[in-house]
Image (cartoon, rainbow, N blue to C red):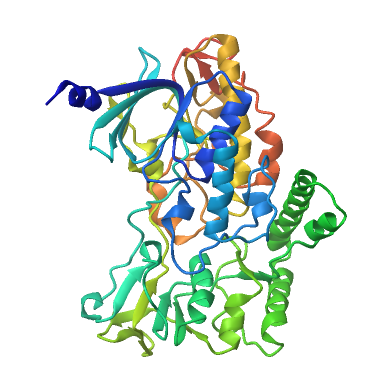
Amino acid sequence: MNAAAAIALHDTTHIDVLIVGAGISGIGSAYHLQDQCPGKSYAILEMKDSFGGTWETHKYPGVRSDSDLYTFGYRFKPWVDAPIASAAEILRYMGEVIEENGIGSHIHYGHRITRAAWDSQANLWTVEAVRKTDGAQVTFTANFLWMCQGYYDHEKPYLPDWPGMADYKGTLIHAQLWDPKTDYTGKRILVIGSGATAATVIPAFAEKAAHVTMLQRSPTYFFASPNVNELADKLRAGKIDEPTIHRVVRTQIMHDQDALCRRCVDEPDAVVAELQEAIKAYTGPDFQFEPHFTPRYRIWQQRLAFVPDGDLFQAVAAGKASVVTDEIETFTATGVRTKGGTEIEADIVVAATGFNLLMMGGIPFEVDGQPVDWHQTVNYRGMMFTSVPNMVWVMGYFRASWTLRVDMLGDFVCNLLKHMDAKGAKRVDVALRDEDHNMPLGDWIEADNFNPNYLLRGMKSLPQRGDKPEWRHNQDYWAERDEIPNTDLEGSEFLYDGVRAGKKVTEAA
């Protein structure tokens, strides 16, 4: 091995803040860091060869957002197109953020992290990664770790082990692994699933396929509406500048979402009736909701999937797509047979069965030589964890746009870093307080609050929650937008350099 190769294998870089992931969370966090803490050095490690995260991973036909871009977009970068956007449009928007703010030079693509270890003696994170281009192991040390890698496995989606899969002679693929080169013109397509991915891919398939069948175990609630924002269009007609339009429309949408969420709990029957009427605007008054569009769960328990221009229901009403509500008994050579005896023949079967939860991207974590078991930690407001210093994890909202929390936590982290600098502190921890003694602990979120299958399957890999606001991710943006910006960084849940804010630590919680 020559000297240059030896150096490459032991390449070490130190920065103040290391951001993991160049998706929607990582790019937004980088913007806030360099805007609010311009003196901090930082780097972004990204496993993929490009930015984008979710929008780079998914390449199935019609892939689009299921949140409006006035709230899914960043607060600092106006969105100027239709509210529901394609993956290509979102990637273009993110690329503009990177270019306009000089973020690209901080991103290290093709770096797969293999270890993250905290050393309390040095007050440093050491993060080891393998560089894809040459297979070299590189090391980064950082004072603070900002985890923006998302919450699911981008390489291994959730695919049930159905009976008879080996007997099927057609093409079987998970939507997350879809090859854009696949020609489905004139094909019979079976989509297994009924969530946001199915609602997106079915109308896209229906444009060229011979027929599309959606096989669902149980129905989903959908919100059908034109892919326009009338307020934005009116303000543009009045020659209002785009930053003002973005701020005003964003505020209006969040107000309307808050009202809808509360109505889902307080008057669910009325909301369901309104959703059905909205669908009929695209299908005609005789559209039948039983049995395929009458969910079993309560309307607030899962994310409400948005269907722009009612395209899914237009495809069903036009006969281009059909729905079967049943469970799979077995795959056959030509398709699927359900437990109810329905034979569905298909040239292509697309599993829109969701993803596998993956805490911290599956990266092995250590604190002072001891492996971290995330389920043994207690989460602080869904972003920090007991016994894990100098780290924040970005976990967005289930019922509101993910990026709302990216912006919010960007402010929080920058305020925390500046507070540490003002105190001269090198380390920050969160720990249960005296008043939290004997506080009951439970799973990350109550099943009655939010219960999609991917979350229920992976609950034991997530940190625990307490029964107080500080020790849970309450999924309520409208409460957190007041609570998190007003966090008392000298509250007794914070420890700086081992000393509890306001008093000396006598016992680690």
Decide which of 128, 483 is in the foreground and name it: 128
Reply above or below: 146 against 289.
above
Reply above or below: 80 against 319.
above
Q: Which residue lies furthest to the left in this view?
A: 1
Q: Is residue 395 left or right of residue 161?
A: right
| Quadrant occupied by the C terminus | top left
Decide which of 333, 452 is in the foreground and name it: 333
Residue in the picture at 42% in, 44% down: 462
Image position, residue 151 (x, y; %): 44, 47
Residue in the picture at 37% in, 16% down: 120
Image position, residue 220 (x, y; %): 55, 71
Q: Quadrant of residue 188?
A: bottom left
| Quadrant occupied by the N terminus | top left
Decide which of 143, 368 is in the foreground and name it: 143
Residue 466 in view (yes/no) = no
Residue 68 in view (yes/no) = yes
Reply above or below: 16 against 287.
above
Image position, residue 349 (x, y; %): 36, 77
Image position, residue 371 (x, y; %): 29, 31
Decide which of 401, 109 is in the foreground and name it: 109
Residue in the picture at 69% in, 39% down: 481
The total of numbered circles placed on residues is 0
